[in-house]
Image (cartoon, coloured by chain):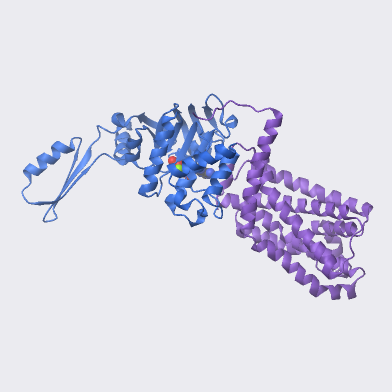
Chain colours: A purple, B blue
Amino acid sequence: MLLETGYRPGPAAALRESLHRIRAMAGNNTLIRLRDPGQTISYVVMPMVLMLVLEPLYVRAVDGGTTKVVTGLLVMFSVFAISIAGNAILAERTWKTWDRLRVSRAPAAELLIGKTLPIYVVMIAQQTILLIYGCLVIGLPIPGNVPLVLGAILLWAFTLLAIGALLAAIVRSHGELSVITDVGALTLSSLGGALVPLSLMPEWAQVAAQASPGYWALELLQAAVAGDTAGVLKPAAILLGIALVCGAFAIRRLTRGWGRGGLL
Amino acid sequence: MLQAIDLVKRYGPVLALDGFSLSVAAGEIVGLVGHNGAGKTTFVEIVSYLVRQDGGHVTIDGRPPSASRGRVGVAPQHIALYPSVTVREHLNLFGKLAGLRRAALDSAVEELTVALRLGAFIDRRTAALSGGQQRRVQAATALINRPGLLLLDEPTAGADLETREAMLDVVKQRAGEGAAIVYTTHYLPELVELQATIAVARSGRIIARGTYDELVDGLPGEVRLIHDNEEEVRVSTTQPAATLIDLLGRAERPISTIEVHNPSLDDLYRSLAVSDAP
Ligand SMILES: Nc1ncnc2c1ncn2[C@@H]1O[C@H](COP(=O)(O)OP(=O)(O)O)[C@@H](O)[C@H]1O
Ligand SMILES: [Mg+2]
């Protein structure tokens, strides 16, 4: 009458079961995102308004001002979206639900994929919407190499997701997380040249900028929008490195759970 | 089904478990009781592989906890539900994570909806539910795939009467089907109703294990009389009926209140402390 316990599925069946569980997790997290859309919406609408307002300024101040205003604000607000990822993951701890998932049949890898996939989609959607808006409303020339731009977005969103997961794994509360993401996002992205074009910033800032993922994201996106395949490589490699390091740390922490020791 | 031998767990200077041994057979309900901090929840966490022990062994059907993922149903001590997700969505999520699909999933959801009386709020978000309702939802998510081992950590804490009744019925039914069940509680009458084996934890180990008859039946209860002038008489006794008749026979004034208390868990803890002493 009880479920038999010694059953081992073959590889094809195991994959099917795995996908079934990932779909369940991802579905649940999509529901949660859809029922609490405020932050996501504001991180799409705010940069739209700012692009519109700042565009004339940029065009007068620097060469290629239109590209710079669109990619700059896109990068800045995509960095803010780290807090969406961080809060979504941290909430599993606040709600104590992560431990419930950890005792389920789903291995940690499935839980992480099911958890982060919907957030990844949200981040990609945010950036894609802003780029399309940039082309249609702000006058950004339509990129010649669309797959390259898409690849750049996928990579940058992946980096942000990994950073967000890492933050969620190490902070102790939602308050701490929002301080880090708000201050961090503003500093990193403006230092990276997302708010004011780098060429207008003081010299020390131009040097310091290279330490910011935001700087490399801008390089990446501007090269991708310009169809400069060779120019994409260096920033892409650096961002991928950052993503892999952050992601590895986050996975290590999250698969072990938070335990009761550091409860909020 | 479940065998734990000599478990040790340290949290810094705190010895949460200190030689904790407990076994539960298929179809058996073990009522795990003990003061707060006795180590009950730590034991549950080790068996469910959320926490690693520093010493000792656990096997579940012959396997270690690491190889038993998904075979153990756990209802944690604290409510752990998604606030914006409905009851039905919770059951579907945990059912799917346990590998249930379509018809099997639907019938499991249907069965638990009836058994734990979730029907009236099945499509409400859990944030909008009362504490007792949340308890029932939490238990339902632990029971959804009929696991062979159930760990229910204070499933009736803060629960209303309806929740308690439904919970006890389901637990009895699952034990009848052959599940091994660890049930922690602070209410002795629940364990009487479940006909559970009682295991008493103190300071990280099990200090007594037996049936109600073996552990509690011989302990003194209390008879309490209040006269019409508020004067009170309390007698500790192992034979409440005889004591009551005797007291009534000797009463010199009219009596306004009569109370007979069966032995409580606290009486049990006290008796163990005494018999424990060197
Ligand atoms: N994560 C933890 N960090 C530090 N101490 C802990 C942790 N978990 C449990 N303890 C300690 O271990 C002891 C046993 O706790 P617990 O298992 O929760 O007892 P019970 O469930 O019987 O009330 C307590 O002293 C508690 O403070
Ligand atoms: Mg406890």
Q: Position of residue B21 (x, y in %)?
A: 45, 29
Mark yes or no: residue B107 visible: yes
Residue at (68%, 61%) from the top-left corner?
A40
Farthest residue toward the front?
B103
Q: Position of residue A32 (x, y in %)?
A: 61, 54
Farthest residue toward the top?
B62
> Does residue B120 appear left or right of residue A147 in this picture?
left
Q: Looking at the picture, does residue A105 appear above or below residue A260?
A: above
Q: Looking at the picture, does residue B156 appear above or below residue B70?
A: below
In the foreground, B116 or A149:
B116
Q: Position of residue B72 (x, y in %)?
A: 53, 34
Residue at (36%, 32%) from the top-left corner?
B196
Q: Looking at the picture, does residue A232 appear above or below residue B242?
A: below
> Does residue B192 appear left or right of residue A167 in this picture?
left
Q: Position of residue A165 (x, y in %)?
A: 69, 50
Q: How many marks?
A: 0
Q: Looking at the picture, does residue A117 appear above or below residue B180?
A: below
Residue at (80%, 56%) from the top-left corner?
A213
Mark yes or no: residue B202 visible: no
In the foreground, A263 or A230:
A230
In the foreground, A183 or B228:
B228
> Does residue A139 appear left or right of residue A21 in this picture?
right
In the foreground, A65 or A193:
A65
Within the image, what quadrant is residue B267 found in?
top left
